[in-house]
Image (tube, coloured by chain):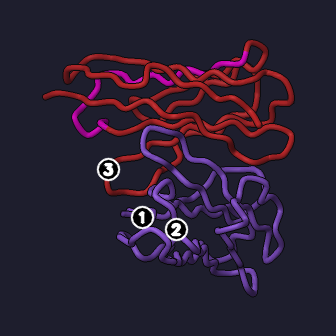
Chain colours: A red, B purple
Amino acid sequence: ILNVEQSPQSLHVQEGDSTNFTCSFPSSNFYALHWYRWETAKSPEALFVMTLNGDEKKKGRISATLNTKEGYSYLYIKGSQPEDSATYLCAQEGGSYIPTFGRGTSLIVHP
Amino acid sequence: EAGVAQSPRYKIIEKRQSVAFWCNPISGHATLYWYQQILGQGPKLLIQFQNNGVVDDSQLPKDRFSAERLKGVDSTLKIQPAKLEDSAVYLCASSPRTAGELFFGEGSRLTVL
C-alpha cells in the first residue's frame, strides 16, 4: 500500500488569488500521478494524468508539475474563482497500476 | 457519451441491515473500480474488476462486503450486515484500460444508524 499525502488539508482564498497544493508520494515503483477535482454533489472529474518526471500540464488557469525522483506534484490555480471551490484529490499509480488516493485538499474561494 | 451511472444516490439504514449499490460504467470500459470514501479520508479501493474478473480485492472486508460484475458490464456492491463504520460515500469508477484516467459516478452516500 502506497502512502499519498496532500497538503494543506483545507485552504480559504479570496477571488483573484493564486494558490497551490502539494501531493507527496513514494518515489519508488512510480507509474502515474492523477489529479481530480470533486465539487459538492458532483462526480470527481479528472484534471491531469502525468507519467514523466518533469512533466508540466495546463488546463485553463490550472496547471500541474511532477517530480518523480523526489516524489511530489504541485497543482497551481491562477486567479482563483468561486467556481474553483472543490476538493482536489491526487492519486498515484504504482506497480500494481491501481490508483491510491490522498485525503484531498478542500479549497474555498470567497467572492 | 453517457457517464458512469450509480444508484441509489442516498441510502439510510440501521446497523445489521443489508444494502446494495449498483453501477453501470461507460460503455466499452473494461476496468471497473469500487472505492469507499469515509468523511475526512481519501477514497480507498475496495475492489477492481477487469471485464468480469477480479484484479484486486485485498481491502474488501469479505465477511460483510461482496461485489460482482456479471457479463463484464454493470456491477453490484453489497454490504450484509452493515455496521456504523460503513457510513461513507461509495464511488464507482471505470476506465478504458487498466492504467489511465478514471471516470467516476456521482457516488452513493450510505448512512448507517
| Residue mark closest to the camera, 2 vs 3 | 2
Label 2: which residue? B82
Residue A66 shows in this picture: yes
Taking the spot 49% from the left edge, 53% from the top edge, the residue there is B85
The C terminus of chain A appears in which quarter of the rendering?
A: top left
| Residue mark closest to the camera, 3 vs 1 | 1
Q: What distance separates the C-alpha of mark 2 from that of mark 1?
A: 10 Å
Q: What distance separates the C-alpha of mark 3 from that of mark 1?
A: 16 Å
| Chain designation of label 1 | B
Q: Tell me the SS state at disc 2.
A: loop
Instruction: Give the amino acid type for the residue marked by disc 2 in the picture.
Output: Ala
- The magenta stretch spans residue A93: no
Q: Are marks 3 and 1 on the same chain?
A: no
| Chain designation of label 3 | A
Taking the spot 50% from the left edge, 24% from the top edge, the residue there is A75
Counting every numbered tag in the picture gives 3
Label 1: which residue? B110
Task: Tell me where the magenta segment starts and ends, as one range.
Answer: A71-85
Q: Position of residue A86 (x, y in %)?
A: 35, 39
| Chain designation of label 2 | B
Residue sitting farthest toward the bottom: B71
* Circle on res. A40: 3
Q: In the depicted view, which residue is nearer to us: A12 or A15? A: A12
Q: Position of residue B63 (x, y in %)?
A: 71, 67
Binning the other alpha carbons within 10 Å of mark 1 as few (below 14), some (14 to 19) or many (20 upward) gives: many
Q: Are marks 2 and 3 on the same chain?
A: no
Which of the two labelled residues, at mark 2 and mark 1, occupies the earlier sequence position?
Answer: 2
